[in-house]
Amino acid sequence: MFRTQSATSIARRAVHHTKQTSVSAAQPTLARCFRQPTRRFGTTSRCGEDRPSFKGQLYESTQQRLIRERAEQARYARAQHDTTPGIRAFAMTVVLISASLGCYYLGSLKPASIPTTSTSPLAATRPPRHDTSPSNLQAAWADLVEIVGKENVSTANHDVDAHAGSEWSSYAYKENEKPFLIVYPSTTEEVSRIMKICHDRLIPVTPYSGGTSLEGHVTSTRGGICVDFRLMGKILALHKDDLDVVVQPAVGWEDLNEELAKQGLFFPPDPGPGAEIGGMIGTGCSGTNAYRYGTMREWVVSLTVVLADGTIIKTRQRPRKSSAGYDLTKLFIGSEGTLGLITEATLKVTVKPKSESVAVASFPTIHNAAQCVAKIVAEGIPLAGIEILDDVQMKCINASQSTSRTWKESPTLFLKFTGTPLGIKEQISLVKDLAVSTKSQSFEFARNEEEKLELWSARKEALWSIMAIKRNPDDRVWTTDVAVPISRLPDIIEQTKEDIVKHGLLAGICGHVGDGNFHAILLYNKAERETVEGVIHRMVKRAVEMEGTVTGEHGVGLIKRDYLPHELGESTVDAMRRLKQAFDPLSLLNADKVVRIEPPSPGEKDIDPTSFPEYSNLKVGLVPSVDSQCPYGGPAEVTRHCMDFVCWLRDKLSPLLPPDFRNLLLTRIEIINQAMQDILPADEMRPEDVIAIFKLECDKDPRIWDLPSVDICTVPHCLGTLLSDLDHISSSRRSEGLVRCRLNLILFNCLAAEERYRNAVAAHASIVAPDFEILPGQTSPTLPSSCYSIGPEIVRLSVETAFSNEVEYNRRARLLYGTADFALWYGSVEEMSTNMVVVAVSGETTARQGEGRCLALMSIVHSRRKEDGRKNATVYGVCSDGVEFYFLRIDNDSKYSRIGTGLDWNWGKSSDIVSHIRNIIRLALEVTPTPTPTRP
């Protein structure tokens, strides 16, 4: 019974298990995963016959994977076959370009290399990368609103136009030279935060103070934003005992003096009405008080400045003197907002004079007025100011009725006196006597405060009186200034007035005659714009020729920027550019002012360097100057190459000459060599020793002769100057230029001596010695006058001029070859003798540019020779920039031709240069209709 039940029970469980297995097979996989495994009792191999084994499953999975991979490869092959080769090449190109751009971007993230030069030439300057896109500027607007508030950020058209320029500015801004917005900060910290935003977003910034500048300082040439400091017009502190005051940049000098007057003090610099301290410091201005009190530079103690990246610095503490490090205060004065934004200034003040008066004296001419000023200065009378207004300016003041009286319309001096009442009375008496002695037509002085203001009002109304007499609403005013040595002021004023009258312009002239600074105020319309530009250009040119400056107090801005290299030299301007890059590497602050930050764009009007013929930054003579195009590295290299020059001259110049004549030349050259090696210092050379070596001939052979005594009598005198220049060559580029000119003179005089020797020997087998003595124990043979024709006086004067002090003032070398001699010439073409047949010009930017100028000179000589009835009027010329030479000829029929091609001047090709020059001398000798024999 038990066994039967047990079997039945087992059967039931087996059936039940079978049912559960079928049910579980139909259940979801996740349920099966969490279900307890079913027990199997007494199972055999038959239970799994309907399922594949593990190996079978693995094999099946591998086969399926291989089948899928083969299908994928077949599909890729069909796609590749369907794709054309052009599409594949295009795709490959896109990939390569993308990879290249990625590599370039990653490379641009690498830090820039550290500059190794002390200057930054314009050609090597990278253009700034500003971001003035609308989206970037609009995002900056939102950032600025958070800093200063919406009410202090303006994008209104009338505000933008007002900050782009002014009616009295000489610069006519273009439509794209406007700021996007105007921001008005009120603290130094706000200015710093503004600059940090602009620095991060690469937005250019233009500072704006009183807006009275005249040379385009406030024009936003790169767009961006304008920072107007009108909310920063507070006097922060007055230290009466220390005589200094701390102010913000928007404080006007007139308002400051009103407050100081309450304390018995005053601030002397007094530029035009409306000027504010920030702009006054930026331009380094002065005013009518500059004659006695100096310019703005003398009245600034320290500055608080925000740099281009938002950094705040203070240049000094308040002591009147300090030797603590670099004087950054003076560096920022006159920087015109290009190095940093001035937010506070500590200024000196002085005690207000107990009494003050003015006087007015009229004269028949500018020269009479200048003579009066010269006598006042010579007498040492301590006037506070000496101003001059010309007759045209006085007429404009009367016509505009800008003052309460009618003035005498002639050149007028305005004189300011300060001190005690008794001292002023004495000064007025002395000045009146001096004015009478220089033919003054009237002399009037103020007897009270009302008369003082009335008399001085004409000087302060000069600009506004010109603007008040506009002929039509479109007329504009161009106001500019230059400064020259006081003794040259009458000359430049008269020459400028003549130029203005010649071109039919209306212009007044006024100036601070006490310090050689004068202003020209020209009224013009659009049609006269280019004429006015020409007048201003020539005025600036005259100022530099007279050792003056292109701007006395107005600053450089945009108008005078391209004149700086002509006054200071390109290297000096390059050094300024390096300073700009050090303080403002992104060129965000007042871009394009003072110095260029990138080369002029095609079509942009620039100053033509060839229009400054009388001073081309020492690029004169035939030995190249030390600049970026010259292979020499500096003054030491110049000296070394000068030594190479004389060594070459000693070895190569005259190898075919007779021994005695060659020894004579070599002896003279050796003296130069020794002097350059400091073997024979200049102060140990007696003049007679130099003369004996450089002037007198060798007395061993009476046939040997050299330059006639009347011709080159100044060469020995000049060697001492040459040696002196070499001693100072490291500190003055001007001396360096003189050395080059004087070395050229020695070179070509040796060439001329050799050429004349050859011709003289060819013409005469024996040369008779003269019967006169030049120096004790020394005689010099000479040629009969009938066989040697030369202009000795011309040569002598030209050499004297070349080695006189005038070389420092008139730096254009003109080389003239005579019938049998050579000289450096610093004079006008009209002074040339008609027997000069070869003309050479150097100093142009390139030799090809100088070709036209050279041809003009040659044409003058050519026409003169034809007028003199010369059968052969052929003229030969050389034009050079110190690097290349071009040889020219104008024949009898006035036909022009170029002889040969340009040659590079370097020490390896000196023999070629000398050969060409000797050929020109030979040609000149051959075409000259004189008894001078030609070479066989």
Image (cartoon, helix red, strand yellow):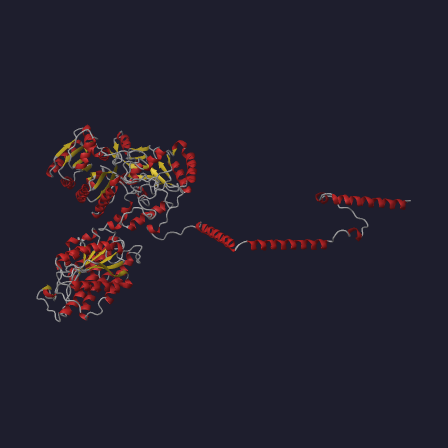
Where residue 556 sits: x, y (%)?
A: 28, 43
217 with respect to 144 (left or right): left
The answer to whether any part of residue 803 appears in the image is: no
Q: Quadrant of the N terminus?
A: top right
Residue sitting nearer the eye, 293 or 400? 400
Q: Quadrant of residue 415?
A: top left
Which residue is more in the foreground, 885 or 549? 885
Res 179 quadrant in image: top left
Residue 403 spot, x, y in % from top left: 20, 30
Residue 59, by quadrant, is: bottom right
> Is 229 on the left or on the right of 53, as rendered?
left
Q: Is residue 191 placed above or below 42 in the rendered structure?
A: above
Q: Is residue 432 above or below residue 495?
A: above
Residue 890 x, y percent position in the rendering: 20, 59
In the image, is 106 to the left or to the right of 269?
right
Residue occupying the point 18% across, 53% down: 805
Task: Name the quadrant of the C terminus.
Answer: bottom left
Extreme left residue here? 771
Give percent across and percent down for residue 896.
Answer: 22, 58
Instruction: Give the residue at the far right of this rendering.
Output: 1
Decide if residue 490 is in sight here.
Answer: yes
Tell me how many marks there are: 0
